[in-house]
Amino acid sequence: MFVLGRPIAIELGAEGRKGDMSTLGHYAAIARMAPGALARSAVRRVQGAARHALYHRRSPLDEAQLLEAFGANRAEELAEMALGPRGSRVWCDVTQRASVREAVAAIPGALERAKARAEQALRQEWDVFGTRVVFGEGRPVDWSLDPVSGHRYPLTPVERMAHHATGRDPKYPWVLGRLDSLVALAQGAWLESSASARARLATAFVAQTLDFLQANPVGQGVHWLSAMEVSLRAANLAQALVMFADAPEVRRAAFLVPVLSALCEHTAWVEAHLEDQGAVPNNHLVANHVGQLVVGLLFPELPRALHQAALAVGGLRAQMEAQVHPEGTSFEGSVPYHRLAVELFTLAYVVARGMGVSLGHAYEARLRRMFVVAQAWTSEAGLAPQVGDNDSGRAFAVSTRGDCEQGYLSSLGAALWKDAGLGGGPVADEVAWLLGGAGLGRQAAQPALPSPVSLSLPQGGVHILRGAGAVVTVCAGRQGQAGVGGHSHNDKLSFELHLNGRPVIVDPGTGTYTRDPSLRNAMRGTAAHNTLQVDGAEQAPLDAARLFALTGDARARVVVFQPSAKHDRLVVRHDGYRALPSPVGIERTFVLDRHARALVVSDRLVGTGWHDVVGRLHLPDAQARWVEVGVEVLARARLAREGPAEFESLSAELGPPGAPLAWVLLQRGLIANLAPSRFSPGYGRVEAACAVEFRRGVTPPVCLRWVVVFQ
């Protein structure tokens, strides 16, 4: 098929064009799990080809067109036209500066944190997934460098770039290229009382912005590979520019002409390269709309800005319905990606509301529910479990957060809507920056609340048991992204256990994406999760050629969810091993017994034949040892509901020697050992750890039981 001279087809990839049946199977699975997705994708590809053709026919914006767009006769008038008073209440407008400063000063440590981020941006220093990269104040930045491999991406047209080559990872230079640092510089300038300090920060903003634009021409190099990155960069640049609106260094025509032109080129690129052409569009498309909305509302005079903003409003409403379940979970099949989705949809909401634009009641109601969900699985220390992929992604550029932090979202949600169900905790820095004094007042007015309760989220496939200082997060649902599974893992019936806010039994995380395909698949494989593996098989096939697809559906689902005052009971099941020569079904029961302060897990296998069954409990470190079962620990294990009748004489003691956190007691007859494992606390980092591993040869039906007793 040809449209406007460009070939259009459903992209099968090289292996598909060679007739690889795994690719055909991949698309057959998508057709089965997301009916109509491929047809809709084909239509969007035709539309995308038309956008491409129009984009390549346009001429870049010149200075005369820019001045005409803003109604300026001379370049010197541009500052007043583009950066003059807006009369808006958007968070980054200079009219909000006094309110934000007071709010920041009222949160313990917030002022110091913001100034530290500004100083880091002045030094042109980035933490790139655990690797510290420093270029120095006023010096050119090597924007195209992957600091881990040392590879430097060339300035060639993106169509000719092989960005997924093994050993390289474009996400590393993208950390620099999102230009969060520009917002950090602006935050520092808002907080400084010294005119010379503000001038230094404004000068750094100008220099860093121009350095990036000159080093990365439109459409060339790694920073134009992903429309998501282009869009978030445009949003950050636009917000920082508005924050610096009254800085003399920024109001010079020699700076404003190229920067405003660059914003126009960014949004034009995103409009032509919308990431809507996959079988099931995901968070990338949401990010595209967010950037279009932010730039279009902050600088409506730019050519096509209002048109792009209007399309973004419609797109965001549609994607809120498509990508967020009614219960409030993201459809990505990943708890960390839920955080990214919350921040993306919230940034759009905050900017739109500040500019007097409504995204609709349905959008707001579902966004509000997303905050409730994040609170449900977040521990007392503010940490969320690593269910599914974790690429440490965020959309807010106003703060620095740990890879698994989500506790701050409760505070922000309470301040956004004066929601008592989300209040009661410490006030997050994001409240001060995005909502100012009014948000701080709404958050402070909320009463202290009881701890979150157990909750089952069947649409998202996540189920949370809470009590006795424990948070147990269980994964049992379909693959994410409507069954495509781009960010899902073979983790069905797996779980994480946090005790008193501390991760004790963990999902090992993600490691990396394209840099090391074998590590990528190992970290999302069955053996990397706290679930049963039968005969060494995967719950769903892992295709080395498809690092962002996991379409084999194990049909994981909830059978029973029974919370109560004394104990919670959850029964989940999956059919991932029904395809074995001798099929097996697995049903796992979790009982969180608050009185015994223990978690009992029972695995019931039904089926035929003899099978080698292995279970694993992955730890975040190597702090575990075998010890004689203590009398008090054994008594509590026997007291726990539905536990084994007899135990092995040794238990696995978890945590530091002399200060254990928990003990794992196994049913008699299970063969156990401590096996080497790996733990990725955030994207790009992999640390040595260990796992409690137990196995047994069985002929179903059979039930295997074990207990975790808490310190």
Image: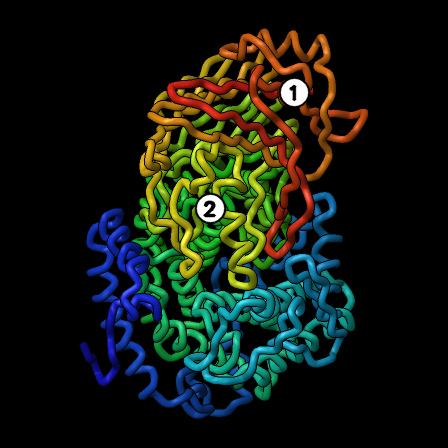
Residue found at x 32% / y 57%: 22
Task: Count residues near mark 2 (Cα–Cα under 10 Å), then give few for <14, some for 14-19, many for 20+.
Answer: many
Q: Measured from the top left, where is residue 563 in percent x and y?
A: 44, 17
Pointer 2 residue: 338
Q: Tell me which label, 2 or 1, sits earlier in the chain.
A: 2
339 vs 134, left or right, is left
Return the residue nearer the eye: 172 or 588.
Answer: 588
Say above or below: 462 vs 546: above
The residue at which mark 1 appears reads as 710
Q: Secondary structure at mark 1?
A: strand
375 vs 103, left or right, is left
Q: Which SS class for mark 2?
A: helix
The percent position of residue 229, horizontal first and vertical second, equals 49, 67
**Type of residue at label 2?**
His
Is residue 393 visible in the rendered image? The answer is no
Q: Is residue 646 left or right of residue 368?
A: right
Q: Please, is residue 585 above or below residue 704 in the view?
A: below
Residue lying farthest right?
Answer: 658
User: Residue 330's image quarter?
Assistant: top left
> Height in image: 550 above or below 80?
above
Give the answer, above or below, for where 308 lies relative to 406: below
- Front position in the image: 598 or 115: 598
* Kind of residue at disc 1: Phe
Instruction: Work out whether residue 64 can be spotted.
Output: yes
Q: Residues within 10 Å of mark 1 (few under 14, many from 20)?
A: many
- For the C terminus, the image quarter is top right
Residue at x 48% of width, y 26% of height: 697
692 and 452: which is toward the camera: 692
